[in-house]
Image (tube, rainbow, N blue to C red):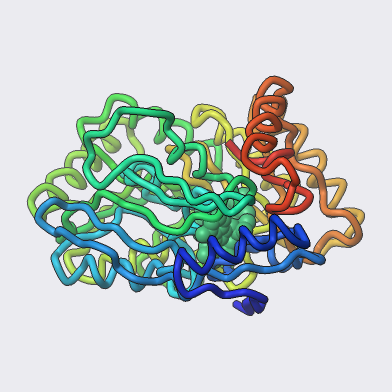
């Protein structure tokens, strides 16, 4: 993925703070933080006139007391580099990140990135216990600490997650980590009709098993991302995939149990164990987000409404891959359509999602000419609160000019 070039690339937090302070007391240039540049927004919105401040040289491991299962690192470390450090101690950060060779921890925090295992493992919010960041005036602030027990003060960690660099530039983070699991297993349900997935998802409410991922993909998404993957079991309209991870016995028991439960409901399924190459399984299930043609939009609805969204979106000609258990979906045009036709279909789909009290956000892409389609607006109260927060931390509007994070961010 092409990466924009930063204009400033500080080597330490002190250098970053000095530059931000001088900018604030001097030219007050607009600033956008640039991590690995892997987000699709860079393609559709190439930062206009803002100064790009790169974090790639802030990539050190500050402290790793592996027995405490926490790690403190600088925000520009790439996710692959971070996972390699943890793997040497048999540990991991439980998170799926696309383009993880390029994406940085700061970018992941700023966009609240997650993937298929969000259902069972949560998001970066659940792993973050401390953060340091520099605001637009060059003030370095810290929140949380290096231990899990800290309850005092405002929870600025949560405030920065998903802020997209609009409130402060994240310089360092402390995370709690988990042991690496040995095995993974999947139960596939091929779909003759997308609506059949409703019964499968309903059965998970009473299952004795604990899946980490519950995916429903329509057929065009499967054909685009997984055409040659032999382990995928799909039907004419797509698949449901329920995945587990853990110890060998634990995973074997869960896949067998879930298969029995589904067969009792007369739902055909096929289970597969993966005690090797588990990473390949997760890469396959995250391949829609990782694809060379990245998704154009992201949506969220209550998990109970995800099947309706899949049926409607498929009818409108979108490829859709959903983390159905979490009510999150990714989509793009499945076929070549004119920009105006695409805009009409997207607007109809957005309206449909909003009628279900859901949210759709345009991420980028070339299918729409001119202005990118608007995302779902935030409720008025939330919008007001975010504006107040922005005024406190960045009264001159230096960070993230235009501030899409404030006007249309995904919950
Ligand atoms: C709204 C949004 C939601 C997304 N959600 C997901 C998701 O759920 N799952 C998924 O797979 N991918 C998601 N993405 C794509 C996501 O951007 C990438 O997956 C990746 O995490 C970005 O890492 P990066 O280092 O390449 O960030 P970049 O592409 O460099 O930057 C992404 C954003 O983060 C800001 N940023 C980067 N570093 C810092 C920092 N140190 N401090 C403050 N701000 C910083 C940038 O200004 C920019 O706004 C999302 C993208 C956007 C825009």
Position of residue 247 measured from the top left corner of the image (x, y, whole percent): 11, 53
Q: Which residue lies at the image location 36% right of the left edge and 49% below the top edge?
A: 117
Position of residue 394 measured from the top left corner of the image (x, y, whole percent): 67, 43
Q: Is residue 156 left or right of residue 137?
A: left
Q: Can residue 236 be seen?
A: no
Vertical order, 177 against 9 (above or below): above
Position of residue 52 measured from the top left corner of the image (x, y, whole percent): 67, 68
Q: Can residue 209 be seen?
A: yes
Q: Is residue 70 left or right of residue 282?
A: left
Q: Nearer the viewer, residue 185 or 55?
A: 55
Vertical order, 371 against 268 (above or below): below
The quadrant the C terminus occupies is top right
Q: Which residue lies at the image location 23% right of the left edge and 62% below the top edge?
A: 63
Position of residue 197 measured from the top left corner of the image (x, y, whole percent): 47, 38
Number of marks: 0
Vertical order, 143 against 303 (above or below): below
The quadrant the N terminus occupies is bottom right
Q: Quadrant of ligand 1?
A: bottom right
Q: Which residue lies at the image location 87% right of the left edge and 46% below the top edge?
A: 344
Q: Nearer the viewer, residue 370 or 339?
A: 370
Q: Nearer the viewer, residue 40 or 76?
A: 76
Residue found at the very far top of the displayed protein:
381
Q: Is residue 377 left or right of residue 106?
A: right
Q: Which residue lies at the image location 34% right of the left edge and 73% below the top edge?
A: 81
């Amino acid at each position: 993925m092409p990466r924009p070039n930063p204009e400033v690339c500080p080597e330490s937090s002190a250098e970053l703070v000095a530059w931000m302070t001088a900018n604030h007391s001097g030219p007050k240039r607009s600033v956008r933080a640039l991590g690995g540049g892997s987000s699709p927004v860079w393609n559709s919105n190439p930062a206009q006139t803002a100064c790009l401040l790169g974090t790639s040289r802030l990539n050190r491991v500050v402290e790793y007391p592996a027995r405490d299962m926490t790690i403190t690192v600088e925000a520009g470390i790439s996710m692959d580099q971070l996972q390699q450090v943890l793997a040497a101690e048999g540990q991991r950060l439980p998170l799926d990140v696309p383009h993880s060779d390029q994406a940085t921890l700061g970018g992941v925090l700023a966009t609240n990135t997650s993937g298929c295992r969000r259902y069972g493992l949560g998001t970066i919010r659940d792993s973050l216990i401390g953060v340091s960041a520099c605001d637009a005036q060059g003030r370095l602030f810290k929140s949380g600490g290096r231990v899990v027990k800290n309850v005092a003060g405002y929870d600025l960690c949560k405030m920065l997650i998903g802020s997209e660099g609009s409130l402060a530039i994240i310089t360092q983070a402390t995370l709690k980590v988990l042991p690496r699991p040995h095995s993974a297993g999947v139960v596939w349900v091929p779909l003759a009709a997308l609506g059949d997935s409703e019964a499968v998802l309903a059965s998970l409410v009473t299952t004795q098993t604990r899946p980490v991922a519950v995916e429903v993909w329509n057929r065009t998404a499967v054909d685009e991302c997984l055409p040659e993957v032999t382990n995928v079991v799909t039907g004419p309209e797509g698949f449901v995939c329920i995945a587990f991870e853990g110890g060998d016995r634990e995973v074997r028991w869960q896949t067998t149990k879930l298969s029995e439960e589904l067969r009792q409901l007369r739902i055909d399924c096929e289970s597969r164990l993966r005690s090797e190459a588990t990473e390949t399984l997760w890469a396959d299930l995250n391949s829609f987000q990782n694809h060379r043609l990245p998704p154009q939009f992201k949506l969220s609805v209550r998990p109970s409404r995800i099947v309706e969204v899949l049926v409607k979106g498929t009818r409108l000609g979108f490829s859709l891959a959903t983390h159905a258990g979490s009510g999150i979906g990714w989509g793009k045009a499945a076929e070549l359509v004119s920009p105006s036709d695409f805009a009409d279909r997207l607007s109809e789909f957005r309206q449909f999602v909003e009628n279900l009290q859901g949210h759709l956000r345009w991420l980028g892409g070339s299918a729409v000419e001119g202005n990118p389609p608007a995302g779902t607006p935030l409720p008025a109260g939330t919008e007001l609160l975010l504006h107040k927060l922005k005024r406190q931390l960045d009264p001159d509007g230096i960070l993230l000019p235009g501030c899409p994070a404030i006007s249309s961010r995904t919950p």
